[in-house]
Amino acid sequence: MSGQSQTIVEVNGLTAGYGKTVILQDVTFEVRAGEVFTILGASGCGKSTLLKHMIGLRRPMSGSVLIDGTNIVTAEGQERLDVLKKIGVSYQSGALFGSMDLMDNVSLVLQEFTDLPREAIAMMAQMKLKAVGLQDAAYQMPSELSGGMRKRAAIARALAMDPKILFLDEPSAGLDPITAAQLDELILRLSESLQITFVVVTHELASIFAVAERVVMLDKDSKTIIASGRPAELRDHSDDPAVRRFFHRQAEERPAR
């Protein structure tokens, strides 16, 4: 894990929602270059909503998201394209094209956004698949892969443009504990070998403690961040009951009848 302290992502006063319904209110935090940063919280707290705003899929009601110094909320034209090239995204479902083998899935990004010759694109796609341990599955279809392999393939595609920041949405969802642990190891290895920043959305405690250097925790009721810091510090020292329940897997107490 990197010890760099330069800020690469800044979320400032972000308020977001759908229609008139506010999901997130005045969310502010920063992500440091080279770290594995995790956004966590219980289901329905707005983790995926926040991710969509950070990668520019949705426009907030107010606030800004700076990616390497550029506000992705207001960027347009070439400036927006340039900032989008700095990020890669791996969605919870993997979002691989089922009619294409893994080589074509990874190559498609390079074909769309570069002028590289076919041979160079094929070589780069092979390199990305090798980076996630799938070089021997390059010509298999997504339907032929296990859930863990599909997650790895999605990461390989997200790495295609050599992004500075990789966003992972619930990477361990639906995986057995051993496969999830292997994916955690892959995240750490890529973070160290490629020196890129990871922003991971998850509620999986094992993965949080395995990979995260720092976290922010969202809360459904207050619609904002209720805790931030190192996972072990929040688990051991937080005074917030909601934070303690989350890190200690405790059900919310119900009033006696």
Image: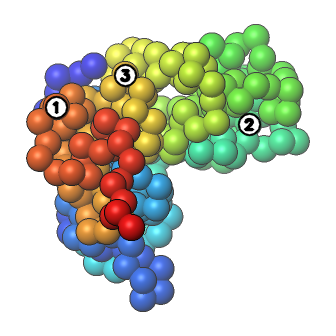
Task: Give the residue pinned by disc 2.
Answer: 105
Hey, which quadrant is residue 206 in on the image?
Answer: top left
Residue 33 is at least partly visible in this image: no
Along the viewing direction, whichever of 72 and 234 lies nearer the viewer: 234
Crowding near pointer 3: few (<14 within 10 Å), some, many (20+)? some
**Would you say the residues marked 2 and 1 are in contact, meaning their CB atoms lie under 8 Å apart?**
no
Residue at the location (78% across, 44% down)?
Answer: 97
Measure the alpha-carbon separation of dots 2 and 1.
43 Å
- Considering every residue shown, the one lying at the far bottom of the view is 20
Task: Give the residue pinned by disc 1.
Answer: 236
Is 167 situated above or below 122? below
Look at the numbered disc 3 and give the secondary structure of its residue.
helix
Total residue callouts? 3
The amino acid at mark 2 is Asn
Crowding near pointer 1: few (<14 within 10 Å), some, many (20+)? few
Along the viewing direction, whichever of 160 and 131 lies nearer the viewer: 131
Residue at the location (27% across, 19% down)?
Answer: 1
Measure the alpha-carbon separation of dots 1 and 3.
16 Å
N-term mark: 2 or 1: 2
Q: Choose mark 2 or mark 1, whichever is in front.
A: 1
Task: Give the residue pinned by disc 3.
Answer: 210
Hey, which quadrant is residue 198 in on the image?
Answer: top left
Is 200 situated above or below 138? below
Measure the alpha-carbon separation of dots 3 and 2.
29 Å
